[in-house]
Image: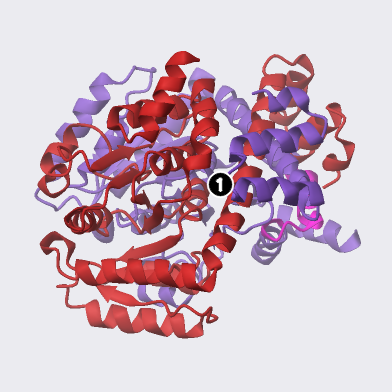
Chain colours: A purple, B red
């Protein structure tokens, strides 16, 4: 454990390479990664965690790049975790194209990491949340989580943020529809990016209409317009991020919100452990193969087969649900 | 059970309203819905199930609309299930805007349904897969599943298709990057839509480059170009869909593929039952509240808390993983 102790120490000292190594351990579902999170967990909870969500193409990454420039000018250290597979933060040749983002790659005050491997053993959302804890433990003042906001894993991650920012682009009525239909929860801040688009004002009006129907919760959701490629509107957005953080702290809702999020995280981790245990047990189970034969021959439906699987492991009550 | 028997009978007779009602039962996690799936399951397995995936804005819905027009001209009955929250198939005012899709709404040979409620009790992917079975049982010749291809639920659904079509738009290098990085599995057919774009040829070349690196599996993945809004290239795409179906049947891989998919479905259903049982048990558990206090106070990390939760329920071995 000597090497892990050293890794934990270096991580807590803010060493970038230790942080990168630690996240890789968690991503690979290495037990040493989980040990490390356990060890450094008492040092977490200090970072301001901001989730940035929105459809691919809305300009989330460029916006995050601009926010990072702003935060660095205020001398805050930053970490970015992207779980959007279409994000330019994703490792690879693509990065070379994006000057605005790559300018941060040489800055030791900025740590950027992406996760997109859906095959991750422990599940994408579990690994991402552990990675966010490691960034927090490494003393980053601000942690940004970038997601496309679709899919349960993404939602699990974004739910973990203290402040959620939804980025929309003008003309994407579909996103407004999703908000209206309650598919997407009302975020804390809404940004209409690419604001030089002629439909921006219409978009802002439509969003205002949707928000007026939503229940009021003390915090009035601001609608901001930005033009991230030219850094326009970004200072105002950062002001709102700081204001929302102050609101959470003054109302005492930060700890309540975090407790709620941690509850979801614990349940997800436990459920995913249960699932892996089940998968291991069924791997070479001849009884399961016979069940599958019946399902494949359309004699037994999948849900009844699932019930039978659980009954086999003595969980009769679960099989009734 | 008399009313359900009637519903099953009407569903099997292809009644549209019975199908709509049945899907609602499944979506609401009503036990009658699961009973119904069990009852009609022996009559499933006949539909050709095609998954259409791709980022929002790639034109999936318009493409599906054009495919549906083609299939109706060949006198085949069709069902479309969309689990893309940004899709225009999603119910609501938006539909009015899309003439190309709405033309199908009055045709009894076309059944269109969307699911986007991430709060669905049984989980989105479970409900969607049951809905697909119901469409199959209702005698639809072709079932199209539309997803954004991001997130585990979407992947679970698309994995259930006999044929998977990936829709890309020119200039979206990010999607190619996702293919290259192995984030997205290689589909059976790739479509570059909006092919009047100047970057189409470049895109096709890039995709060809990525495919040349992928392992060959007997079926050579075709790359087609379409201009769905003008129905261009759609006949070729339908030919490829039919060709792929023929390939699966002639090679005997259709039943193998379906068995593999049904296996995943049974495991997912069992795992989600386990999760719900866990959530019910923890609902008012004072021991769990004390654990959460420790987590919130940063004295116990979430993964260790999850382990403790499982130990409590006598699943000591799971807690070790």
Q: Residue at x 52, y 31 (%)?
A: B39
Subunit of label 1? A
Left or right position of A58 against B1 = left
Q: Which residues are magenta?
A: A26-41
Q: Could you tell me which residue is drawn at 72 percent across and 28 percent down?
A: B297
Residue B70 in magenta stretch: no
Q: Quadrant of residue A69?
A: bottom left
The residue positioned 65% from the left and 32% from the top of the image is B273
Q: Which element carries disc 1, helix, strand or loop?
A: loop
Q: Is residue B98 left or right of residue B210?
A: left
Q: Specify whether residue A38 is painted magenta.
A: yes
In front here: B269 or B183? B269
The picture places residue B244, in percent across and down from the top left corner, at 40, 70
Of residues B15 and A196, the one drawn nearer to the viewer in this rendering: B15
Residue ID for mark 1: A141
Neighbourhood count class around disc 1 (C-alpha, 10 Å): few under 14, some 14–19, many 20 upward: some
Mark count: 1
Left or right: B273 as drawn, with respect to A254: right
Up-down relation of residue A146 to residue B289 (above or below): below
User: What's the residue at 50%, 84% (across, down)?
Assistant: B213
Asked whether residue A279 is in view, the answer is no
Looking at the picture, how far across and down is residue A269, in whole percent?
Answer: 69, 40
The answer to whether residue A167 is above or below residue B180 is: above
Where is residue B182? Give x, y as percent: 53, 69
Instruction: Give percent across and percent down for residue B133.
Output: 46, 41
Quick check: A125 above or below B314?
below
Q: Nearer the viewer, residue A2 or A249?
A: A2
- Confirm whether residue B321 shows in the render: yes
The chief SS type of the magenta part is helix
């Amino acid at each position: 454990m000597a090497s892990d102790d050293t890794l934990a120490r270096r991580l807590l000292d803010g060493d970038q390479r230790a942080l990168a190594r630690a996240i890789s351990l968690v991503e690979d579902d290495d037990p040493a990664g989980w040990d490390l999170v356990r060890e450094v967990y008492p040092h977490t909870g200090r970072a301001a965690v901001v989730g940035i969500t929105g459809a691919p193409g809305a300009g989330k990454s460029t916006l995050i790049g601009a926010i990072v420039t702003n935060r660095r000018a205020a001398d805050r250290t930053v970490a970015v975790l992207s779980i959007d597979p279409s994000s330019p933060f994703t490792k690879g040749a693509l990065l070379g194209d994006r000057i605005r983002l790559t300018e941060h790659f040489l800055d030791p005050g900025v740590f950027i990491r992406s996760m997109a491997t859906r095959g991750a053993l422990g599940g994408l959302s579990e690994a991402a949340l552990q990675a966010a804890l490691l960034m927090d433990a490494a003393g980053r003042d601000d942690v940004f989580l970038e997601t496309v906001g679709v899919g349960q894993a993404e939602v699990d991650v974004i739910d973990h943020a203290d402040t959620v920012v939804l980025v929309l682009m003008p003309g994407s009525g579909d996103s407004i529809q999703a908000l209206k239909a309650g598919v997407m929860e009302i975020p804390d801040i809404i940004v209409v990016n690419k604001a030089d688009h002629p439909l921006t004002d219409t978009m802002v009006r439509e969003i205002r209409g949707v928000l007026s129907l939503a229940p009021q919760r003390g915090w009035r959701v601001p609608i901001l317009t930005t033009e991230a490629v030219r850094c326009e509107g970004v200072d105002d957005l950062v002001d709102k991020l700081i204001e929302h953080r102050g609101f959470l702290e003054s109302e005492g809702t930060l700890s309540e919100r975090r407790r709620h999020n941690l509850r979801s995280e614990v349940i997800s981790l436990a459920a995913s452990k249960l699932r892996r245990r089940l998968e291991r047990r069924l791997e070479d189970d001849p009884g399961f193969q016979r069940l599958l034969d019946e399902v494949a021959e359309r004699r037994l439906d999948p849900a009844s087969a699932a019930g039978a699987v659980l009954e086999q492991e003595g969980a009769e009550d679960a099989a009734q649900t």
